[in-house]
Image (tube, coloured by chain):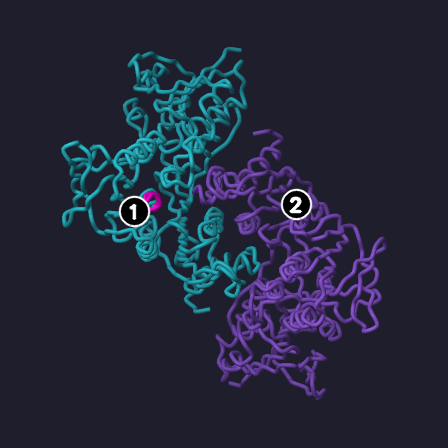
Chain colours: A purple, B cyan
Amino acid sequence: MSIERLVVIGGDAAGMSAASQARRLKGPEELEIVAFERGHFTSYSACGIPYWVGGDVGARDDLVARTPEEHRARGIDLRLRTEVVEIDVAGRRVRAREVESGAESWTSYDKLVVATGARPIRPDMPGADAAGVHGVQTLDDGQALLDSLARARGERAVVVGAGYIGVEMAEALINRGYQVTVVNRGSEPMSTLDPDMGRLVHRAMEGLGITMVNDAEVTEVRTGEDGRVRSVRTADAEYPADVVVLGIGVSPETGLARAAGLPVGVHGGLLTDLAMRVRGPLADGRVWAGGDCVEVLDLVSGRERHIALGTHANKHGQVIGANVGGGYATFPGVVGTAVSKVCDLEIARTGLREKDARRAGLQFESVTIESTSRAGYYPGASPMTVKMIAERGTGRLLGVQIVGREGAAKRVDVAAVALTARMTVEEMTALDLGYAPPFSPVWDPVLVAARKAAAKVRGGTR
Amino acid sequence: MSIERLVVIGGDAAGMSAASQARRLKGPEELEIVAFERGHFTSYSACGIPYWVGGDVGARDDLVARTPEEHRARGIDLRLRTEVVEIDVAGRRVRAREVESGAESWTSYDKLVVATGARPIRPDMPGADAAGVHGVQTLDDGQALLDSLARARGERAVVVGAGYIGVEMAEALINRGYQVTVVNRGSEPMSTLDPDMGRLVHRAMEGLGITMVNDAEVTEVRTGEDGRVRSVRTADAEYPADVVVLGIGVSPETGLARAAGLPVGVHGGLLTDLAMRVRGPLADGRVWAGGDCVEVLDLVSGRERHIALGTHANKHGQVIGANVGGGYATFPGVVGTAVSKVCDLEIARTGLREKDARRAGLQFESVTIESTSRAGYYPGASPMTVKMIAERGTGRLLGVQIVGREGAAKRVDVAAVALTARMTVEEMTALDLGYAPPFSPVWDPVLVAARKAAAKVRGGTR
């Protein structure tokens, strides 16, 4: 039996999960594995970067789940600081360049995994690349930001964008003693929520002393003579800044794959089948892709989406590794669950927002309820707001958003499972959720929302 | 149109929810509502009693969701301290006795709701009724216990039984400064878990200074000359006790219904249809029952169970009220979710234990995994043990048990929804659960368990 070679492009969650899983199923006598990573690190938690920057996580290495040495000890030929610059699909080979020396060489493959991740969107404006302007997508990015913070010794930070990364970075910078201004294009922070729920986050951020500037777009980053950032301008105002963090989202890093002719979708991510194999004749069933560089199927809307999230990347890697290793696994899709926090305010969503539902052509009913995290009489009970969206007519659950203190974030998992199972809100009213006074009111907030949504779908008021 | 009369027997969760819901749908011009309650209170949280006794909840009235006055203000003719002593189903009337005066009278009904609750099981042994021996099922029971604690000024408490109530009462008594011994018939506390998971609870209880005596049955309560409890005896030992709390479970309070000829099941609870109407020709479709006095369908095993839990009682009440009020609602059944805590140890279960699965005739695979509540590097991450049981062959989820610190209890809700949707553990591996470092490892503990269970079902090791 000849030895096959698996080449992996990208050494973080999706790529190295795939490599590790494939290695678990096939030993070096069956499968050679070569992995290229252009940065210094492998298998780290990019989602942990805000907490490292903010000081909750002490050391960079804490974020590393598996070091290059550990991967190598498992028989993976890992080439760090080596960037793949070309995929030759027809020739089944990749061209890689050592970052330091510039030396290039071709490596052939029998199977290829594209796990090139995503890159922070940099606004197209003067000064966007100035010193002191940082994305926080990779561990290298995080290190550069921390170095910059140490060098700048400033007091004022501007965060551009108020999505998950923007909000988490605002908290991180507050924790480091900065005066933080968040400049946000939308009408409220957390545009992954409907604006009425985003408003709750807005209030909480102001309560933390964060200055929120909504409905504003950054037009220029102004620099001093040293080339470092000095301020951020919008159409209406100018905000002094010793450091700027870009939190306006990421886009799939698919330049390499596009150049090779592999298919990408409307969001710029690679398109795969359910086994995470890249679609189309060119890929020839030999190319897999996963993590932040692919689009995934949204099971609620039936459309493709791009979601950069470590938990999906890990699942993709597992699925790819199982298939490459001769097993069988699929990634059926997502329902769009995301959780976050600003200090003790927990923020969660799953499924469709009102505007997603509209875009998907769905008619819906929407309800919002106030409840508490524990029985009202139990010490520490805190308010929780649940918004629930259900399809008109069928009553099928379409989405849930929750904002509150303890227990708000992970409560959304109930809705995530219900969405996966395509439950109606009426069915949800009977869910047998855990109840005890320290953990929930006798009607869990999700059940309260489901009852109200079910009544609205029925046109009644029960 | 003639006015109908609804009679409700029992003024706690199920009965008063039914009455309130019916009143919301039908005004006094259509429906007269008479409710009998033999105690002093209505619509209170029996589940909150341990926290009131332990001092976490300051006042008895905090546990009351709706007072008798509030019910009366809504047009419910509530008769407190009045016990129904006979149901005449053929004559459509009930005989009630005022507890203080002993005066009796008949009240006719068009529709009847039986919500007589449950009563703590009292072991059949000498001294079981002695002063200082307490059940904790009703608010009156809780008050009697607190009065007893104030009178006794003792130091030593014995809790008989180590289920939810026993464990919660042990914590309550520790919080009040008692030396607590728990005498438990089973091999480990929390027999609602498999013994391997119960062992984790055992260890935590010992860590709190609670003396756990397993595999022991109380044979006698010894009293002093004043008739008050002095000690508790088992076959092997004697435990000094200034107060004894019975936590050996409850049984449905169905004497009245049985005497009337209404059908009860193998667990002694009333049998209803999905609309919570009592089965059989005698009830004639006019008699409903809900709460702790009924049996419910276990959706996983397909068998009837008796579960005394406030959240079910409230749901039953809503369903009964909707149907009595001219609407339509059903209670499809339970999956057996229960959560509790001992200090900061959270305990959760849903679905079948190994022995339940065996009893139901199911073959299964069982896995146990260790994970953490948050990303391992995130401050405050604490260990969590998840046990998952799946049907052999189909891979259908049968049950989950979780023991851990923060976030363990309500994580079981994911499994509760998955059970309701009859998901397989393979399907569960792809669930889109909320992930962010403060709330979960990148693979949520439930997903880790699902992956291991799916591999075992497949006979593989992935």
Residue type (three-letter) at the residue carrying disc 2: Leu
Which range is magenta?
A: B168-180
SS for callout 1: loop
The residue at the point 49 percent across, 48 percent down is B417
B200 displayed left or right of B438? left
- B171 is higher (above) or lower (below) than A319: above
Q: Which residue is mark 2?
A: A200
Residue type, label 1: Ala
- Which residue is pictured at 24% across the width and 52% down the height? B214
Could you tell me how far apart the alpha carbons at marks 2 and 1 are, in whole angstroms?
43 Å
Q: Which mark is nearer the camera, 2 or 1?
A: 2
Mark 2 residue crowding within 10 angstroms, few (<14) / some (14–19) / many (20+): some
**Residue picked out by circle 1:** B162
Residue at 50% across / 41% down in the picture?
A444
In this rendering, the answer to whether A318 lies above or below B86 is below
Q: Nearer the viewer, residue B338 or B177?
A: B177
Is residue B176 magenta-colored? yes
Q: Are marks 2 and 1 in contact (CB under 8 Å)?
A: no
Residues beneath discs 2 and 1 located on the same chain: no
Mark 2 residue element: helix
Q: Give B268 or A74, whichever is nearer the viewer.
A: A74
| Residue B32 is a magenta residue | no
Q: Quadrant of residue B262?
A: top left
Magenta: main secondary structure: helix
Q: Is residue B235 left or right of residue B410?
A: left
